[in-house]
Each structure stands twice: as C-alpha cells, then as structure tokens.
Amino acid sequence: MNALDLKSLAPTAGSRTLMVVSPHLDDAVISCGATIWTAVRQGWAVVVATVCTEAADDEGDGAAALFNGADGDVHRGMAERRREDRAALAGLGCTPVHLGYADDSFRPLRPEQRKDDYGRFVDPSRPLDVGLCQDIACALTLLMDAVSPTLVLAPLAVGDHIDHRRTAAAVGLVRIAGLRIGWFEDLPYALDSSEGSDSRRPRGASRLRIELTSESLSRKSRAIQTYSSQARFLHSGNHDAWFERLETHSEEIGGGEPSEVIWIL
C-alpha cells in the first residue's frame, strides 16, 4: 500500500484548501493532527471547523460541569478549551473556526442516568436529533461557501459518540456542487473499538494512507498536550504512554508504517 502525497488530490498550486470538521475541541488534532501538519507542509491552507465549542445556559444536570467545567464554571471552562484549541492549531499552522454549538453533556439526563455515566454519549441507539443536524449543516454550508474547500474531512463516528454521529450526519446533509468529502478515523475511540474503522467507510470510498514522519508525529504530540484541560479524560496524566498507543495503532493501520488513514469518495 503506497503512501498518499496529498498534493495529488489537488495538483494545482494555490487551489488546495482542506477543511476538517471536528465534533469537539481536540478531536481533529487527536484523530488526524499529523495529516493536518503534512497538508500544511505540502502547501494546503487548512481550516479546522469545530462544531461543539460553547457552553449552554442549561448545564445538563451537572454533567456539563463534570466534562467541561473549570471549577464548576462551564462558561469559563469552554473559554479555556477554545483558547487551547487556538494554540494547538496555531502550532500545526492551520486556522480554527468555532461554530458555537453546545456538546451533548449540556442535554438533560434521563432519570436513570448518572451525571458521570459516559456510556450515554456512546449509545448507538440514541436518535441523532435531525433538526440539530440540519442546523449544523446550514452553518457548515455557509462556511464552505466562504472557504471553498478542495476537500472536507468528517469523522467516521467510530465509537458511536453522539456528537461525532451528529457531526458526520450534518456533513452528509451539505449540498454543494462538486464538493469532495472524505472521512477520518475517530481517535482515541478507535483504539478500543471492536470493529475495524474500514467497516465504517461509506460505500465506494477509497482508503488512502498518509505516511507519518517523526516530525509530524512530534507536532501532533505537542498539539495534543496543548489541550491540558482534557488530560484527565484522555490519559490520566500519562501522555507519553497513551501516545505510544496511538503510535502503535498508526503502525497497525498502516501495514507496519506509521500512518493516518482517510477515506475519500
């Protein structure tokens, strides 16, 4: 399996713009940060549009404060997460856009749920909320009209996180003539998924491997560490051991060569 030179997707200089649509503030960097850095090095303008970037007035029965709060203040917590995102993406040489939706932790719990029950976010039986997906699709359409991306990457929704599923569905609702769409593998969810990410790829999509270098891996690692507010959820303070798992996974999906994989129609 040969590595992909991203320039082959848009060979004309000056015509290459990649938009990565990220469910949360950190998903794009964790999932495909090395691909983003590689694209920038190859002359692409890269925009990372993150869907869930704001706090809601309704704090979701305390779940939002648990996952997003700074000492219980969700508005201050989300402001800190946006600051981290701007710093991380600046380190990769790309432009952040924050779409301003609240993540699922702000939604009210059902009576039988605990606020620390992470399982509710990854329940594949939960409905997507079609109206919300359509609203996000409208926001993405306006942004894409302004940016004119050569390629848009959306999450495959490996792991079934509800915000990832909604983001993927919203991208699928965008109707722009000639728009080329691809998908990235959701990390770290794919590390613990019992199904291979290839099983999620849309019918007819081609699997493309982005070969990773020591530089691109180092850039990705440093960018991930910028999201310090999320460290306790990602790796409980042991970034190096956790990142080794990401590196091992990259070799597995790359057939022995460190890689990130995207699927493109």
Image (cartoon, rainbow, N blue to C red):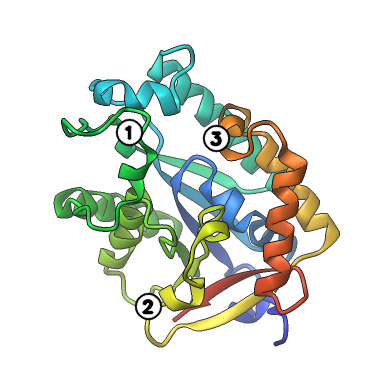
Residue 83: image tag:
none
At a point 47% along the width and 11% down the height, the residue shown is 71
- Identify whether 257 is placed above or below 72: below
Mark 2 crowd level (few <14, some 14–19, many ≥20, 10 Å Cα): few
Residue type highlighted by circle 1: Ser
Q: Amino acid at mark 3?
A: Phe
Instruction: Please tell me in which quadrant of the rendered image residue 63 appears.
Output: top left
Question: In this figure, which residue is indicated by the disc labeled 2?
Answer: 178
Q: CA distance from mark 3 to mark 2?
A: 39 Å
Query: Few, some or many C-alpha atoms within 10 Å of disc 3 (few <14, some 14-19, many ≥20)?
Result: few
| Circle nearer the N terminus (3, 2) | 2
The foreground one among 253 and 24 is: 253
Q: Residue at x 14, y 51 (%)?
A: 131
Secondary-structure class at tag 3: helix
Can you identify the residue that label 1 sits on? Answer: 105
Amino acid at dot 2: Gly
Taking 45 as reference, is 113 left or right? Answer: left
Q: Give the labeled residue for mark 3.
A: 233
Q: Tally the marks.
A: 3
Work out whether mark 2 precedes mark 1 in sequence or the reverse, and give the earlier one.
Answer: 1
Residue ID at (81%, 64%): 213
Image position of 186 (left or right of 41) = left
Counting from the top left corner in percent of width and height, residue 258 is at: 75, 68
Q: Secondary structure at mark 2?
A: loop
Please give the name of the residue rendered at 57% of the width and 45% of the height, measured from the top-left corner: 95
| Mark 3 and mark 2 residues within 8 Å of each other at the beta carbon | no
Closer to us: mark 2 or mark 1? Answer: 1
Q: CA distance from mark 1 to mark 3?
A: 14 Å
Residue at the far right in the pictured view:
214
Answer with mark 1 or mark 3, whichever residue precedes in sequence: 1
Which quarter shows the N terminus?
bottom right
